[in-house]
Amino acid sequence: MNALLDLFTVVMVCAGVFFFFAGSIGMLRLPTTLSRLHALTKADNLGLGLVVLGILPRVDGPLDGLKLVLVWFLVQVSAGTVSQLIAVLVRKQGEVEP
Amino acid sequence: MSEAILHGGLILLFLAVAATSVFTRDTFSAITAFIVYGLLLGLAWVALGSIDVALTEAALGGGITGALLLRAASRLRHADHAAETRRTGPASHGLAALACAGLTAALIVLVLSLPHPAPSLAPLAMEALPATHVGNPVTGVLLAFRAWDTFLETVVLVLALVAIWGLTSDAMWGGRPGPVQIPEPDGNLAFLARLLPPFGVLIAIYLFWVGADEPGGKFQAGTLLAAMWLLTLQAGLIDAPVLSRLRLRLAIVLGPLVFAGIGLLGIVVSSGLFAYPPGFVKACILLIEAASTVSIGVTLCLLVLGPPERPATP
């Protein structure tokens, strides 16, 4: 059981790290602001979500687990809103990038 | 080994972000790098095992200081153009570089000449901690053993606000700070400003409450309150407060007043200034922390908003 939980944690955290990595590369390499935002929010959402999922079996109690999920949720809401705000600004300024 | 890699990576990131902040010519990018620097500094404190300082650094160094700098930058936009036309010569550049290098060298020499192991009062503080009935040694030191320092810290915030209000023009005295925000009731920001504050206020109360026994406390909680207030202001859901209101001004000085009152009470009922009456130590500390949380939240928000710029009634 313990070994299985360890495996679960390792797989999930690794998957999360992969999404963060891919998101970072996307932000550096993608051509337009909107596509860079897309890459970044994917990393925030899936990357952080998988890392949180991976460490959930290792917390001391349900309350600590709830806190972790809350952290993920709050990051979702604020990151989503901020990228919408940036996107609106880009559209208003009529960005013309290749 | 893995710790060495983590610390080494952090140090490299530090240097890179610090260099970006210093060498970037665009003010906005430089401030962004500085905010990232503040967040990284929070991580460094986590790596050193002091969560209290990490929380404060992330909230104050990364959050409020960033907001303050961004506001300052938007005010200084005109001055920026003026600075671009007035170039400084190589002599002044050289002088500045020499002064900075000298200061850095002096700091390095100082750090290297520190005694090893460093003199520490930590064992003494830990030994006396049970007398305060507070579980978090940081809170114990800040509010019991070094209460005088912490009191002056809360006063400094009020003084900073007085200095900013001193910049008010006569006509605007007692008015509202900041520009009028045009609300977009269906906008994203308004959505966030409705959703987030209940969480923020709850987490602020939690941070204040656990501060007695675990990392947290009045500065972290107050900063969070200020951030929530700023968010609702920015979204245009509420208007900036009229600065001449008595209730607002009472909220600003509530923390220092309660702190000073309990401190002075110590002369009468206990052994001296800032000596809490035995048996009521934790109650006193909680009272001071609660009052300070309110004052710090209000003061930090008003610091970011700046001096009044428009009359109380439009």
Image (cartoon, coloured by chain):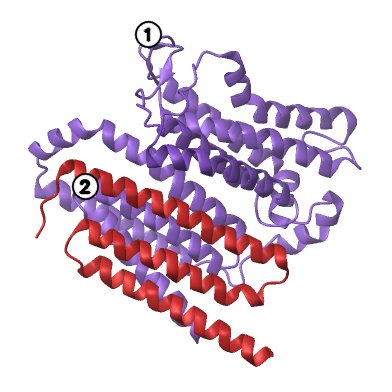
- Which label number is shown at residue B133? none
- Asked if residue A63 lies left or right of residue B67, the reply is right
Q: Secondary structure at mark 1?
A: helix
Q: Amino acid at mark 1?
A: Asp
Q: Residue at x 77, y 61 (%)?
A: B126
Is disc 2 in contact with disc 1, using a CB cutoff of under 8 Å? no
Disc 1 marks which residue? B170
* Position in image of residue B296 (x %, y %): 58, 35
Residue B258 visible, this angle: yes
Q: Secondary structure at mark 2?
A: helix
Q: Select label 2 or label 1 by which is in front.
A: 2
Q: Residue at x 44, y 51 (%)?
A: A78
Q: Is residue B151 above or below residue A94?
A: above
* Position in image of residue A52 (x %, y %): 55, 70
The answer to whether dots 2 and 1 both sit on one chain is no
Q: Colour of chain A?
A: red
Q: Amino acid at mark 2?
A: Val
- Asked if residue B245 lies left or right of residue A1, the reply is left
Q: Colour of chain B?
A: purple
* Position in image of residue B91 (x %, y %): 12, 48
Quadrant containing the C terminus of chain B in the rendered view: top left
The chain to which mark 1 is attached is B
- Asked if residue B75 lies left or right of residue B297, the reply is left
Disc 2 marks which residue? A90
What is the quadrant of residue B313 in the picture?
A: top left
